[in-house]
């Protein structure tokens, strides 16, 4: 089987091995592929592995040899799945590989705002403590999470893990989910979106992006939040109206925003969030622990191996 990996660098910048995938066929691995290079690289491929390289209907219709598309991510909007299905092409994704890693980054961001550890450590290194007349000092308000309300939007695997960590910190947990959740995590409560934003000290967005919820976090919803509240987004950048969020931060409507995703990645220099007050942005790293990426690699290989063996898994339709 002829296998082409279009953008392998994101998954494996050199600290993992492709050997198990290479055992499955004649494998060509590209670190990155520009849109204009995609067709020439996969025109004879039977299996294509992609993370962010887009396979749309027009392209899929030009690939008569293609039998399988493996998306190395949970979200699969880079592939026109319906076009693939019409052509008899199997599409798979990786539904659960980074739950712990993403939840961990949610709290890395929350704790950064609560304690500003790096800022204070740098202050000490610059000599501020050595010249201070007091035994202790702080450059930002210090916040205790216990007793605070954590609101979660999207109560799937990641949302549930975030809830569990919040409960371990002694936080009260409320959540909104688009459907009724029958098996709540103990000591959590499902409610409407408006209450989550109005009552929470921290709001964590962990839902997928759909046509229905695009930019649902807008000025109207942000104005419902407490002026001391923190907004965390590790879902998708398109869930937030970025201009509205920047304005809300700069005008003090909310205290801080912690973002691992933006509407365009990498962002354009003029993105207003890059210069917004108390906006802490990481470059989409929540999924990128070596443990999560190894898990992603393993499932990518398993998905293709199952396809070759006629035992499908993780198929999207």
Image (tube, rainbow, N blue to C red):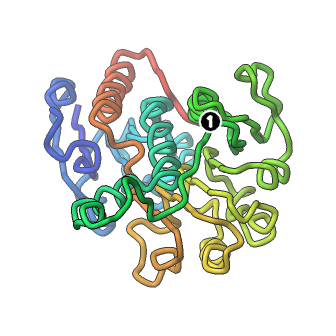
Give residue 188's position: percent from left, percent from top: 75, 28
The residue located at (36%, 42%) in the rendering is 66
Residue tagged 1: 159
Q: Is residue 260 above or below residue 305?
A: below
The residue located at (59%, 62%) in the rendering is 238
**Disc 1 crowd, CA 10 A, few/some/many (<14, 14-19, 20+):** many
Q: In this rendered view, identify the residue nearer to me: 53 or 41.
A: 53
Give residue 52's position: percent from left, percent from top: 39, 54
Q: Is residue 216 left or right of residue 310?
A: right
Quadrant of res 191: top right
Q: Is residue 294 above or below residue 54?
A: above
State which quarter of the image contains the N terminus: top left
The residue located at (75%, 39%) in the rendering is 175
Q: Answer yes or no: is residue 305 visible.
A: yes
State which quarter of the image contains the C terminus: top right
Give residue 127's position: percent from left, percent from top: 23, 66
Q: Is residue 309 left or right of residue 154?
A: left
Q: Answer yes or no: is residue 62 visible.
A: no
Quadrant of res 290: top left
The residue located at (54%, 40%) in the rendering is 85
């Amino acid at each position: 089987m002829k296998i082409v990996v279009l953008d392998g660098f994101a998954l494996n910048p050199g600290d993992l091995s492709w050997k198990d995938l290479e055992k499955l066929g004649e494998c060509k691995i590209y670190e990155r592929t520009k849109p204009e290079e995609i067709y020439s690289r996969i025109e004879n491929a039977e299996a294509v592995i992609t993370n962010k390289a887009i396979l749309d209907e027009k392209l899929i219709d030009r690939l008569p040899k293609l039998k399988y598309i493996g998306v190395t991510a949970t979200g699969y909007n880079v592939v026109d799945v319906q076009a693939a299905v019409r052509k008899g092409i199997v599409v798979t994704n990786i539904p659960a590989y980074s739950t712990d890693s993403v939840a961990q980054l949610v709290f890395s961001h929350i704790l950064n705002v609560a304690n500003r550890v790096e800022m204070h450590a740098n202050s000490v290194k610059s000599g501020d403590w050595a010249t201070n007349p007091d035994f202790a000092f702080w450059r930002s308000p210090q916040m205790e999470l216990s007793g605070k309300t954590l609101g979660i939007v999207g109560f799937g695997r990641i949302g549930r893990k975030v809830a569990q960590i919040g409960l371990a910190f002694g936080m009260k947990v409320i959540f909104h989910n688009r459907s009724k959740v029958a098996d709540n995590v103990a000591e959590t409560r499902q409610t409407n979106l408006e209450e989550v934003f109005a009552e929470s000290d921290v709001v964590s967005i962990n839902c997928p992006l759909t046509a229905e919820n695009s930019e649902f976090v807008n000025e109207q919803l942000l104005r419902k939040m407490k002026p001391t509240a923190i907004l965390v987004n590790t879902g998708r950048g398109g869930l937030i109206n970025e201009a509205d969020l920047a304005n809300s931060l700069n005008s003090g409507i909310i205290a801080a925003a912690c973002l691992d995703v933006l509407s365009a990645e990498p962002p354009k220099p003029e993105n207003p969030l890059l210069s917004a007050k108390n906006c802490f942005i990481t470059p989409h790293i929540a999924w990128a622990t070596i443990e999560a990426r190894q898990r992603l690699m393993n499932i990518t290989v398993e998905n293709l191996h199952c396809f070759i063996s006629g035992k499908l898994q993780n198929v999207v339709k």
